[in-house]
Image: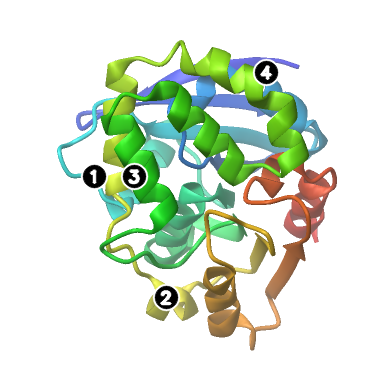
């Protein structure tokens, strides 16, 4: 499979993205929060989403390279939309995971003309000014430059126990490659979620919505997925699915996750 790693360049910012697949439809994936760029996992991402590549050309957008001092989820969404425009894509089938889901919600609400369908994985429509205990701990670990502690806590929170045990050594190895700049960037991205709240705007989404959550999510409270459902449940074009036993990163660990997305986007 041909995988292109490229860079959006415009007057405001630069942003890395990758592209693979040969389909006529545009699928955009906005990944969740990470310490290091997902571009380093391009091969694994393309392999995971291989089911999509006949029907879709798949784009995965990172966050902008040079972060402003304050960078809110709304700002992240607007930059991602500008990246769409720079690359020349519209009529997007949009999948956002975790923080990427928050960004995807902002895009669907503020730019309905761009989005054909939206799928949301392990995400929330709101976070308070104080965030939550999990993300606050990640900020503290990153500020202390405790790279190993951050990676282990991150892995323990997002993966089921058996998966975490299997990948613990790999997490420690990856932590040893993290730079101080990447830690500072991570903190800025987490801080940008403070005060995020689109709950009362969810009904403005004009396209079909699939929300996928996990009963045992240690990062996003179950109530947050239910808040999405409460706002959209009356709509015939809304679907909700909840996983058991796969944790926050069900989008990486549930074996049928990509097939579930594929069927939703093609129906």
User: To which residue does mark 4 refer?
Assistant: 43
Camera-near label (3 vs 2) is 3
Left or right: 10 in relation to 260: left
Q: Secondary structure at mark 3?
A: helix
Label 2 vs label 4: CA separation? 35 Å
Packing grade of label 1 (10 A; few <14, some 14-19, many >=20) is: some
Left or right: 180 in relation to 205: left
Camera-near label (3 vs 4) is 3
Location of residue 173 (image quadrant): top right
Between disc 2 and disc 1, whose residue precedes?
1
Packing grade of label 3 (10 A; few <14, some 14-19, many >=20) is: many
Between disc 1 and disc 4, whose residue precedes?
4
**Residue at the (15%, 38%) spot, across then down:** 69
Please, which residue is most extreme toward the bottom here? 234
| Residue 15 coordinates in the image, percent (x, y) | 36, 27
User: To which residue does mark 2 refer?
Assistant: 199
User: In the figure, 254 relative to 224: above or below?
Assistant: above
Left or right: 68 in relation to 229: left
The disc placed on residue 71 is: 1
| Residue 95 coordinates in the image, percent (x, y) | 60, 50
Label 3 vs label 1: CA separation? 9 Å
Q: Secondary structure at mark 4?
A: helix
Between disc 3 and disc 2, whose residue precedes?
3
């Amino acid at each position: 499979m041909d995988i292109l790693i490229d860079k959006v360049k415009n007057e405001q910012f630069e942003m890395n993205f990758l592209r693979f697949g040969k389909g006529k439809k545009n699928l955009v994936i906005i990944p969740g929060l990470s310490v290091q760029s997902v571009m380093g996992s391009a091969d694994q991402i393309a392999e995971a989403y291989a089911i999509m590549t006949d029907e879709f050309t798949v784009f995965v957008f990172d966050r902008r390279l040079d972060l402003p001092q304050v960078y809110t989820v709304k700002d992240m969404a607007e930059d991602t939309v500008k990246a769409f425009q720079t690359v020349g894509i519209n009529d997007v089938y949009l999948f956002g995971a975790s923080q990427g889901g928050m960004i995807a919600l902002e895009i669907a609400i503020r730019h309905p003309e761009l989005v054909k369908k939206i799928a949301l994985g392990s995400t929330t429509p709101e976070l308070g000014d104080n965030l939550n205990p999990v993300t606050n701990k990640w900020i503290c670990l990153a500020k202390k430059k405790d790279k190993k502690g951050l990676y282990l806590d991150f892995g323990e929170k997002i993966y089921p126990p058996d998966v975490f045990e299997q990948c613990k050594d790999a997490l420690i190895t990856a932590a040893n490659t993290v730079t101080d700049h990447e830690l500072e960037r991570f903190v800025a991205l987490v801080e940008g979620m403070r005060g995020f709240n689109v709950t009362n705007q969810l009904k403005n989404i004009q396209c079909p919505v699939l929300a996928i959550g996990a009963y045992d999510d240690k990062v996003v409270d179950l109530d947050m997925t239910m808040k999405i459902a409460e706002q959209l449940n009356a709509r015939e074009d809304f679907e909700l699915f909840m996983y058991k036993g796969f944790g926050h990163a069900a989008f990486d660990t549930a074996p049928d996750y990509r097939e579930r997305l594929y069927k939703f986007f093609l129906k």
